[in-house]
Amino acid sequence: MSSPEQSEIARFKRQAAERAVEFIQPGMVVGLGSGSTAAFVVQRLAALRGEGRLMDVVGVPTSVETEALARSLGVPLTTLEERPEVDLTIDGADEADPQLCLIKGGGGALLREKIVAQASRRELIVVDASKLSPRLGTRWPVPVEVLPFGWRSQALFLERLGARVTRREGRDGAAYRTDQGNFILDCAFGPIEHPAELARRLEARAGLVEHGLFIDLATELIIVGPQGLEHRRRPA
């Protein structure tokens, strides 16, 4: 059973997601993010289609879970092979800083989420106010997707960069596997002073498939909380 606080956060997420869907225009290719906030986006899009609106919109799902939800609700899908440019992606985030840099990957879909984000003209991120922080890493570890081969050497490398590293586990206690069959190492760096520099160091390491630092990808942020709804754009 969810607590009153969890129910309120879910209500905030739904409000923000439904506001984000208002930016979808007829004929768009829309990136469909992953996680609870993105699920509200898919549900709202399906509801609008039930009203005969946005019938020519197609989605690009960022995870197997999102794909299954969209198909179950009758939302038409496409792929980046068929439509390599995405007009608008709507997704959530685990943490966002004042420059709209993000930590993503708490749900394990960071690789596909970043591929779709990089293919998008606009990346609209939906969060509740609890996800805001003055500096990335303050509230959330950085997920790093790694090949199972040699993963312990990657953990050692990440520890030498200053992280406290935990291999993510599934509900059965076994190693969590991404949609690509890889492991995720959750890396608690604490507040990160230079996230772009850390991202470059991670990208230079063989065996690190992707990391959850999303730098200069989000173009807009919709925030909802007790004070209402706020729409921010990335600083110029």
Image: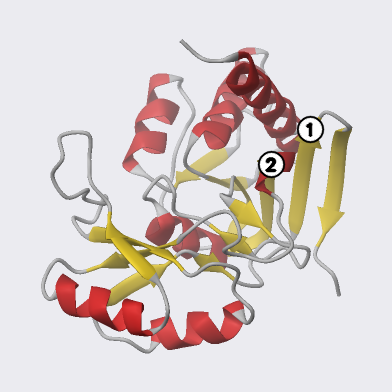
Which residue is identified by label 2?
130
Q: Examine the image and state in which quarter residue 190 appears.
A: bottom right
- Assign a secondary structure to mark 1: strand
Pick the front one: 178 or 120: 178
Which residue is identified by label 1?
225
Task: Evaluate whether residue 195 shows in this view.
Answer: yes
Residue 91, relative to residue 65: is it above or below?
below
Which residue shows up at 22% across the image and 48% down it?
176
**Tag 1: Cα neighbours inside 10 Å, few (<14), some, or many (≥20)?**
some
In the picture provided, is 87 more to the left or to the right than 151?
Answer: right
Which residue shows up at 66% across the image and 30% down it?
13
Task: Evaluate whether residue 82 shows in this view.
Answer: no
Image coordinates of residue 44 in percent, x first then y, are 63, 23
Image coordinates of residue 180 in percent, x first then y, are 23, 56
Q: What whole-number distance in Å separates the C-alpha atoms at marks 1 and 2?
A: 8 Å
The C terminus is located in which quarter? bottom right
